[in-house]
């Protein structure tokens, strides 16, 4: 429920250091395993990450869970498709590489119109918007080379 952005409309409580506990990660993995055990006809499984900001504790909470679910889907010969809804501020080359490795097929990164409007809605600090940083990262990681 935590986030690194401060959008005026957000209903989340921004609880500092709130993340998936090891116990909750285990429950998620157990649920996926039991579901795929009970329903062997499932050939495709989609996992969606959203928050708060799901990339905020990526290495400590999301990645370990994704690795375990990826292993289960490989074992069961199920096609995994994972997807993130993110503000885009924490996407870097390492995150992209790991996501490609563990079945992530897409990101939804929301922009609230052009720069001026977006920066009034989603900002990092009261005096600094996030539009330019998101766009820079899109150019770095989102576009295919010529």
Image: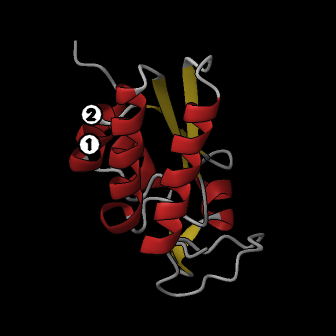
Indicate the secondary structure of the residue bearing disc 2: helix
Q: Residue at x 67, y 70 (%)?
A: 7
Looking at the image, is 17 positioned above or below residue 22?
A: below
Q: Quadrant of the N terminus?
A: bottom right
Looking at the image, is 52 positioned above or below residue 92?
A: below
Task: Give the Cα separation between the discs numbered 2 and 1.
Answer: 5 Å
Indicate the secondary structure of the residue bearing disc 1: helix
Which colour style is shown? secondary structure
Residue 34 appears left or right of 91: right
Towards the viewer: 93 or 128:
93
Q: Are marks 2 and 1 in contact (CB under 8 Å)?
A: yes
Towards the viewer: 17 or 33:
33
Residue 77 appears left or right of 24: left
- Label 1, residues with CA under 10 Å away: few <14, some 14-19, many ≥20: some
Specify the label residue 98 is tagged with.
1
Residue 118 appears left or right of 26: right
The answer to which image quadrant residue 27 occupies is bottom right
- Label 2, residues with CA under 10 Å away: few <14, some 14-19, many ≥20: few
Whether residue 20 is visible: no
Q: Quadrant of the C terminus?
A: top left
Residue 114's spot in the image, x, y percent? 63, 45
Looking at the image, which residue sits at the far front?
38
Residue 62's spot in the image, x, y percent? 41, 58
Residue 117's spot in the image, x, y percent? 68, 56
Q: What residue sits right under mark 2 in the picture?
A: 101
Towards the viewer: 78 or 101:
78
């Amino acid at each position: 429920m935590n986030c690194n952005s401060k959008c005026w409309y957000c209903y989340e409580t921004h609880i500092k250091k709130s993340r998936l506990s090891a116990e909750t990660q285990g429950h998620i993995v157990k649920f996926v395993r039991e579901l795929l055990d009970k329903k062997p006809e499932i050939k495709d499984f989609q996992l969606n990450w959203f928050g708060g900001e799901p990339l905020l504790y990526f290495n400590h909470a999301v990645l370990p869970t994704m690795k375990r679910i990826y292993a289960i889907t490989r074992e069961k010969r199920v096609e995994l498709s994972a997807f993130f809804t993110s503000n885009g501020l924490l996407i870097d080359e390492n995150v992209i590489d790991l996501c490609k490795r563990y079945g992530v097929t897409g990101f939804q990164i929301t922009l609230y119109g052009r720069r001026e409007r977006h920066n009034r809605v989603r900002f990092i600090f009261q005096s600094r918007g996030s539009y330019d940083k998101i766009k820079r990262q899109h150019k770095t990681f989102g576009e295919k080379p010529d």
